[in-house]
Every structure is written in structure tokens, then in C-alpha cells.
Amino acid sequence: MRKVVLSMTMSLDGFTAGPNDEMDWLPPFGDEELWKDMHQGMWDQLRVTDTLILGLKTYQIWENYWPAAGANPASTKNDIEFSRYAEETQKIVFSTTLEKAGWKNSRLVKGNIAEEVARLKQQPGKDLLIAGGAGIAQTFMRLGLIDEYKLLVQPVMIGSGKPLFKGLNTRIKLRLLASTMLRPGVVLLDYEPRKPG
């Protein structure tokens, strides 16, 4: 059965972005050497993924950026490769307010999230990756729909912003599968929820 994997970058104090969606606390995106290990980890995950799960805001940002990134002279090699991947990979957008998902290989889901995810997991294919958006991640956590948590913890505390873990109404006990120290002091933590009992 396919798994739902949450892959998120976060600060040490649990934020995925600053109060106004700032990402200036991450290493500079143009510094390929700093991002080398993180990109490798990202591509390792993408190789076992054939469906991206996105919330409204991330979908809109990606739809405006990634289709053109492949042709942008300022794009890095990694940007160009990811632009191709994002174009060709199925994208499921969970939103009650979006009218239409017009980006290539995108599908809008407005209905019951748990039912849709159960249906997707029964289909043949690779894993489903929650690739962006603290809001959609929080919804999936509350519904108990995440099978694996891959958290890229940056060596910085930003004090305030968009928290990854917010609004949980129950405990989620986790089992550590792996922890990997990456070159710029980033730690990749890989957890799965413990089964009850």
C-alpha cells in the first residue's frame, strides 16, 4: 500500500516560515554547495513518490513559479530538474476555496479528505508526498493520515512564524526510523507513527 509522507523544512523552534512567509532564515538558495546534501535527500524521496499533495497557498506559489523556472537563465541545475519533475508529476490540491486547478497534471479535491486519501492509498503507485503548506500538514496530522514524517530541521530559531505543529487534539507517538546529519548542520529526522497498543 502507498504511504502518505510529510516532508517539511522547519526551524529548530518548529516554524516552517516567518510571520509573513519569510524564508530568509534558510541557507541562500543559490549556494549549491550548501544545499548539496539537502537536494540529495529531496531527490531520494522524490524517486519513491509519484503524487504531490499541496494546500492552496503552496499550490498557487508553485503554479506561478515552477512552470517557468526551467527556462529561466537564473535557475540552478536543481531548479531546472525540479521544474520538470513538478510539471510531469500528479498534483492533488486540497482546497475548499480554489475554483479550478489549471496547472498541468493537477487535480482539485474539495470533498472528504480522509476518504480521498484512503482511495489514493489503495491505488497502485509510489508514495504520496505532502510537499508544502503547514496548513495541509496540520489537517493531515489531525486526521491521522500521515504514515511517515521526514523533517529537515535547520540550525536556527526564528522566534515566531508559521508553526508546523499547531492545533493537534491528540498525542501522536512516533518511532524514530533514522536521523542524518547533513553538511550545513541540518538534521533530517525520519519518524513513523507508533501503532496503538
Image (cartoon, helix red, strand yellow):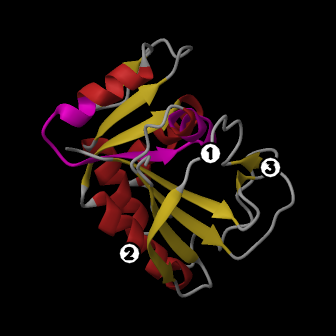
In the rendered image, residue 78, in percent from the top left (x then y), is placed at 40, 67
| Residue 136 appears in the picture as rendered | yes
- Residue drawn at x 33%, y 23% is 116
Secondary element at image label 3: loop
132 in magenta? yes
Query: Do we see residue 75 in this rendering?
Result: no
Residue 148's tag is: none
Q: Quadrant of residue 77?
A: bottom left
Identify the amino acid type marked 3: Gly
How far, Cα to Cα, is label 3 from label 2? Answer: 27 Å
The magenta segment is 120-140
Which circle, 1 or 3, is nearer the viewer?
1
Q: Quadrant of residue 112?
A: top left
**Picture layout, residue 41 above or below residue 150:** below
Q: Amino acid at mark 2?
A: Gln
**Is label 2 in contact with label 1 (beta carbons under 8 Å)?**
no
Q: Nearer the viewer, residue 21 or 146?
A: 146
> Residue visible at 34% across and 35% down?
91
Q: Which residue has dot 3 on it?
A: 161
CB of mark 3 within 8 Å of CB of mark 2? no
Q: Quadrant of residue 158?
A: bottom right
Q: Position of residue 17 (x, y in %)?
A: 71, 52
Chain-order first, disc 1 or disc 3: 3
**Residue position for label 2:** 40
- Who comes first in sequence, dot 3 or dot 2? 2
